[in-house]
Structures are given as structure tokens and as C-alpha cells.
Image: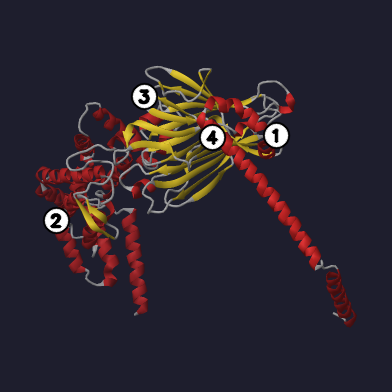
Amino acid sequence: MSRDNIIGLLLIFVILIGFSILNAPSEEQKLEAQRVRDSIANARQGQQQQIREAEAMALEAQQQNPEIASELAPELANDSVINNQLRDRLGYFATAAVGQHQPITIETELLRLVFSNKGGFLESVELRKFKTWDQQPLYLYKGDNNIFNLQFYSANRLISTRELYFKAYVDGREITGEDPIVLQGDQNRTLALRLYPDNPGGVQRQSYLEFLYTLPANDYMLGFTINTVGMSEVIAANSSFLNLDWQNSVRRLEKSRKNELNTSTVYYKFLGKDIDRLRETRDGTERLTAGVRWISFKQQFFSSVIIAQESFSSAVVSTQSYEETNEELLKRMSASIDIPYNSRENNSFAMQLYFGPNHFNTLKSYGLELEKMIPLGWAIFGWINRLIVIPVFNYLDGFNLSYGIIILILTLMLKMVLFPISYKTYLSSARMRVLKPDIDALNEKYPKKEDAMKKQQAVMALYKKAGVNPMAGCVPMLLQFPFLIAMFRFFPASFELRQEAFLWADDLSTYDSILELPFTIPWYGDHVSLFTLLMTASTIIYTRMNSQMMNTGTQMPGMKTMLYFMPVMLLFIFNSFASGLSYYYFLANVITFGQMYAFRFMINEEKIRLKIEENKKKPVKKSSWQKRLEDMAKAQQQQQKKKK
């Protein structure tokens, strides 16, 4: 930078400082400005005080005599103070902001629904046939923290329905907080909650926003339609959608808070696509830009679902977990949903609301793929549960047996189906056991590490000559594995087991406890599950029997320790799992013991030995695998000779 530039910048800086000093207000001007600000603040404070006094007067009149209050409401709304305050904030909906809370209770055979005329939605949803883990009434929706709010712009103002008062009509007849309406049998009722704006532009015609509910007597699914009638001059003409803000602080309903928390999240389904969800184990937010068919606030055994007859334009869903110290609430689930809107005509957007259990057949009956919210496992594991386990379980359930007996019968049936596979596994191990002396001889013949390839080649040749396939025992075990995982997913998700007692377990869907510890053991918990202890003990016994009866001498070093380590790990993992699952694995182990003893008498190892000896005498053609092993062995020998 040149000297002239520097001098110029300094002169500009001096001029700016001088200008600010010359134009600074005097002390008298400062005092006058402060006096004006104080006067404005006092005026505003006085106006707010008048507003509060007027609102208090209106509230007192409403509480003392609702009929007089309803007559005075238009006058109060037209009062200059209230009118200015409400008109500025709510425009056409200023009058609807004044009212009295009037709950409308409707009892069906399955639900107890309490609607509110303020906001036009449900205050609470109680499932009458179910209780919480501590035998309290089971609410899926309850509390002031829950939000159902339709938002739109009107006269450059953002209107929220949650703070406005609706008028209630049952089957077309206006009601004002009467006695509970009870529905039975095949009865149906329609509940219309209408929000009336002030007449736009002084035009005398009927205009309203309507929440229309269709209430069946014996169903968890409710009809829900949002109608706009004559609202073209009320709702902003450039609006292409209405925003529905739905939030629910889901309540703890089950004994194990941890298990329920880890199975509770937001599920959603895109139009024409499969369902998806937010991860259960962490908080998250997802923007759903494609057409959305339904959104569910799903808990372990119950769900609250909003379903579009066609599709929602888009949505943003999120979850936020409460602290572990909160024993009442699990997660805050929310969905901000865009509903299509046409300002040039009346609109009717049809939906459904489901408040009910995550029972597979119940959800499947609606044909909306809601049953896919139940975590039965992916791919083949889920298909085994849907096509085999659930139908058999439901068939046995039809005999009105104890669920502990049903699990026993189900285990026996599965073991019978898998019996041929188990038999082939044991037979393969018996053949390998017969070859153990020959394999030991090869180990003595090739003791050096550099001869490992030769030894492997000789062992494979022995297998080939004896007609034994070392992989024959692995395939049957792999065929059993899908059933093992399928049952692992089925029992914790089975709604039928919820609060069903068996022996000392008071609820097969959660852990059983024979001892409550005064402290918490890391990774284990603060209780002792007897079914888990029995499962662990039987697994250790099974491991010992299996290693003794099926020892072929080819076991990898350290594998025996690993086999015993796994049951100990299961003791920690399963202690807080569903007792029905631990009970099933215990039964499976006991039945396996019987199968192993039966196989011992069914399979004659002496005959197997004679058969193998006969096979050894037969000429054997080398397989391509053996040829590759020989080539690898020769290449290894040549490399060793070069090193020497």
C-alpha cells in the first residue's frame, strides 16, 4: 500500500470519529428518549393488565354459568381490548379462541376415548382389555405433553388448531360434554368436531374446518377425515398443504423398561414400497419426501398409527429418549405431516387411526402391512415365523392350553421336524469317530509343521477312500440354524405371551425373577432369572455330552474352552430376556439329550467300521480337490528345497 493510500484512510477515519462526536445526543436528549420508552412500556403494561383482567372476567363467567358465558362470548370477543389482542394474533379465528373445555367420552368394547373440544382431538386413549405391567389402566395417549395440531396460514397469520375451540356433533346432533357415549355390538357413531371462523368479509355462509371421526364399537381402527368447507377465503390461497404436527410421549407399559425402550421407535411405510423405521437404540430424525402411506408410534406390544387413504405429501419423523431416571415415559415421538390442500374447492382428506396391540393376525387383517412392524426377523427367519411358527402357535392356542404347555408342544413338534437333520449330524460324527485311529496315525506320521500340507493331503485321501464326507455334519447344522434364530425373534415379539403366567414366571414376555438383588451386576442386572439358569446349566451339560459323544480328534485347540465360554455368556445376555425364550431353549436342550441317547442305540459304530473298511479296498479316483492339494504340496516341497 502506498503512502498516499495510508494518508487517505487515516483522514477518512478521523472524519468518521469527528462526525460521530458532533452528532452524539445531548444528556437532555437521552433523558427525553428514556422518558418516551418508559411511557410506551407503561402503556403496554397497562394494556396487558386490562387484557388479563378481561380474560379473567370471561373465565369466571364461564365457570359460574356456562350458558351465560356462551351468550356473552361474542360480546367479550368484540370487546375493544380482547378484540385487538385476538384479532391481531388470530384474525378470523379470534372468536374461536374463547371457550370452555368440554371433554367428550366415548366407550367402545375395546377403547375408552376422550376427545376435547379444544383442539378437536383426543385427550386420552385407554385400551380397556389390557393393563400395564403393574396392573394400571393402559393408556396409549394421555397427558398435556401430547400434541395433535393442524397448522395453516390465514390472513398472514399462522393458525394452530390446538388452541382453538371446536363445536361437537354426534351423528349430526350438537352436544356439550354430556355423559359417556357407550357403543356395543355392531353400533357405529360419527363424531364431528367443527372449527368455525368469523364470517370472512362479512359474507353470510357456512364455513368450517371439520375433524370427522367414525367410531366402531368393536375395532381398534377409527375413521378420521379432515374436511374444509367454504374455507377458500379463510385459508391462504397460495397454500398447497396443511401441516399436521403429531407428538406423543409414549408411556412405559412393560416390566422391563430397557427391553421396551429398545423395541420402541417410529415406523413408516412409503406408498407402494416396504416399511422402514428409525433406529431403536438411538435418537434420530428422518425426512420422508416420497408419498407416505402410514406412520406409526410403535412400542413393544402396542402402537398408535395414522394412515392415509391415499398418501401424505411428505413428513418429518423423529424420536428422542427420556432419561433412564424417568420411570413413566420412554420416548418422545413426533411426526410433522404435510396434507395436500386445494384452495379453490372444498377438501376432504380421509385417514384412519389405529390404537391397539401389535398382534400379528389383528394387524394383518387390515391389509396395510402393519404386521411388518413386529420384529420377527429378516429374510428366511421372518418367513419361518410367518409361515410355520405363528400358524402352528395359533393352532395350539385354539385348544385353550396354558402357554407354557403350548411352548412345550411347539418345541416337541419342531424337534420332530428337525429329527432327520439331527440324525444325519450324529451319523456323520460317528463316521468321523470311527476314523479317529487312522487320523491319529497320520498325525504321528507327519509331526512336523512343514509337513502340514502332506498331512492334510493324506487325511483327505483317507476320507475319500473311506467314503466319508467331513462336511456332511456341517450342512445339517446349518439347516437347523434358521429355526434357532427364528425362535429367538419370535418369543420376545409374541403378543400372546404378554402377562401370561407359567410356573414361577408371572409374564412369559419378560424376564422371570426368583431373587431381587440389592445391587446391580454389570451386564447381568439386579435380579436372578431361574429359567435363564436352567437354560445355561442344560447348555453346559449338552456341550459336555456332545464333546464326549462326538469327539473325532479333529477339534481345533482352544475350541473346547470356547464351547464352555458361550453358555456363560448366554447367562448374562438372557437374564433380562423374555422368560418364554429361555424356557424354550431349556426344553430344546432336554429334548436333545433324549435324542442323543436314542442315536447311540440306533447307530451301530461297528457296522460303520466294517463299511469303511470295505470302502478302503475299493479303487478310488482322485477328485479335482485332491489333485489341487497334491499340486500345492509339491509346490511347497520345491520351495523348501530351494531354501535349503
**Pointer 1 local density, CA inside 10 Å: few below 14, some 14–19, many at least 20:** some
Give the Cα distance between marks 2 and 1.
Answer: 80 Å
One can see residue 475 in this view: yes
Give the Cα distance between marks 3 and 4.
Answer: 38 Å
Q: Nearer the viewer, residue 499 or 437?
A: 499
Kind of residue sitting beneath label 4: Glu
- Residue 548: assigned label: 2
Kind of residue sitting beneath label 1: Ala
- Residue 60: assigned label: 4
- Say which of marks 1 and 4 sits in front: 4
Kind of residue sitting beneath label 3: Glu
Query: Do callouts 1 and 3 mark residues in contact (Cβ within 8 Å)?
Result: no
- Say which of marks 3 and 4 sits in front: 4
Q: Nearer the viewer, residue 419 or 150?
A: 150
Report whether 462 appears left or right of 365: left
**Pointer 3 local density, CA inside 10 Å: few below 14, some 14–19, many at least 20:** some
